[in-house]
Image: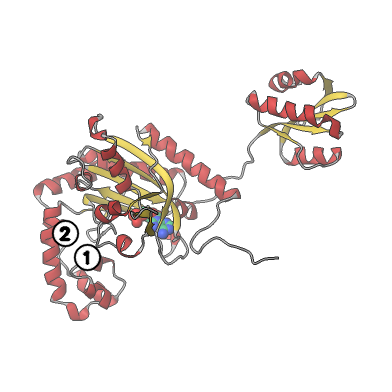
Amino acid sequence: MSDKIQTPRGTFDVLGDAARARDELERTARGILERAGYERIETPTFESTALFARGVGESTDVVQKEMYTFDDGGGGSITLRPEGTAPVCRAYVEHGMHKLPQPVKLWYLGAYFRAERPQHGRYRQFWQVGAEALGSDDPAVDAESILLLAEILEAIKVSPVRLRISSLGTPATRAEYKAELQTYLRSHEDRLSGEVRDRIDLNPLRAFDADHPGTQEVMRAAPLLLDRLTDEDREHFETVKALLDSAGLSFEVDPTLVRGLDYYTRTVFEFTSDALGSQSGVGGGGRYDGLVEQLGGPPTPGMGWAAGVERILLASPPPPTAAPPLDLYVAYAKPEYRRDAFKLAADARRAGHAAELELGGRSLKGQLKSAQRAGARYVAILGDEGTALKDMESGEQRVIQIDTVMHHIRTGL
Ligand code: AMP
């Protein structure tokens, strides 16, 4: 025997209970998002590398070290999508969606790729469910978007969840604040970790995320972006908070909340769960009012989020494992009845019934056992005496015409 080939590091198969749990999550997310007017969108698994370099930001970890980038075979550079917002904005521009009534509300569920160090809850291929609303800067869009993710997490029973929100203001406010923070960090350089020190120029906000005790102490007295917002941005944030309050959703304002992607403006938020250990982020997002324009579209505000499917499932109870109902199991006593049995099972499925044919070459006794195991409601047994239909609930069995099987399973024996 040759060596076994296994899935690459940081990837996994989805099967059995895990596959059923995913289906359940997809059904729940679809229901909640489509009831709020979100429509499904799927973008390609790979995109031009430029989309992420420009959209996500050159200084981010994602672009600097986590992208799977390769030659497209014709001299161009493509990248396996590390996130979903930039692709949705690209699609918005590419399809002229600014001409539709605004906001355009889209949701998606698919696989994303990041070259990270794999660990519990962190993979190289993972799934995200996400939602984006483009074309309105109304604070109600922000609040509604956050509420929809909260409802999905609640419906899937993710617990315990914590919601933190903040506002990053406009790019101008942020640029000014960034300079202020850089000055502050430089004046305390000797107490910062090497990593934070190296990133003062590129991404000083990440200092708030540091685990390093010295850095954390310096950051406790650092100036906060939330205290530097313009009146307009502050009012926007106040309205978002008031709307969340009115929906009864509890949250904490966390002025140090920094998201790993560059495109955010104004509202940012994150749901975490203590059930997850160190990779506690379940989902998050925010407003990105400059992104569409940055990607060559008209000035268009946007707001959205993405949540990790694996993290949601890790932090929630497994759904009850109910086998899908089986209306009819078609058994046959001898190989010469296989043809009729095959046709009966196919006809039953075409008529909308769940029907399975014996495919394992079992004895008739074995077939009846496997019908029972599969939870079949009825078993049709094709044999020398014709077709017998057995009601597995009552145990009643009758010989009937083969062309009346469907009639009998619809109306009862
Ligand atoms: P982000 O785009 O980084 O904000 O990620 C959004 C959500 O996707 C996170 O809250 C996680 O739940 C999930 N996620 C991000 N990266 C990974 C990963 N490498 N493995 C599993 N889930 C991830």
Contact check, label 2 and label 1, Cβ < 8 Å: no
Can you say whether 298 is above or below 378 in the image?
below
The secondary structure type at the circle numbered 1 is loop
Q: What sort of colour scheme is used for the picture?
A: secondary structure
- Checking the image for residue 327, the label placed there is none
- Residue drawn at (28%, 39%), measured in percent from left and top? 94
**Quadrant including the N terminus:** bottom right
Mark 2 or mark 1, which has the lower sequence index?
Answer: 1
Residue 88 lies, in percent from the top left, at 32, 43
For label 1, being within 8 Å of ligand 1 is answered no
**Quadrant including the C terminus:** top right
- Is residue 255 toward the left or the right of residue 17 in the image? left
Residue 220 lies, in percent from the top left, at 21, 69
For label 2, being within 8 Å of ligand 1 is answered no
Q: Which residue is mark 1?
A: 203
- Residue drawn at (69%, 26%), measured in percent from left and top? 348
- Residue drawn at (25%, 34%), measured in percent from left and top? 96
- Residue drawn at (28%, 53%), measured in percent from left and top? 50
Q: Quadrant of residue 391?
A: top right
The amino acid sitting under disc 1 is Asn
- Is residue 49 toward the left or the right of residue 298 in the image? right
Ligand 1 in which quarter: bottom left
> Quick check: can you spot residue 248?
no
C-alpha distance separating marks 2 and 1: 14 Å
Residue 65 lies, in percent from the top left, at 34, 65
Closer-to-camera residue (49/257): 49
* Residue depth check, mark 2 versus mark 1: number of the one nearer the observer: 1
- Checking the image for residue 225, the label placed there is 2
Q: Quadrant of residue 151?
A: top left
The amino acid sitting under disc 2 is Leu
Closer-to-camera residue (85/90): 90
Can you say whether 80 is above or below 398 in the image?
below
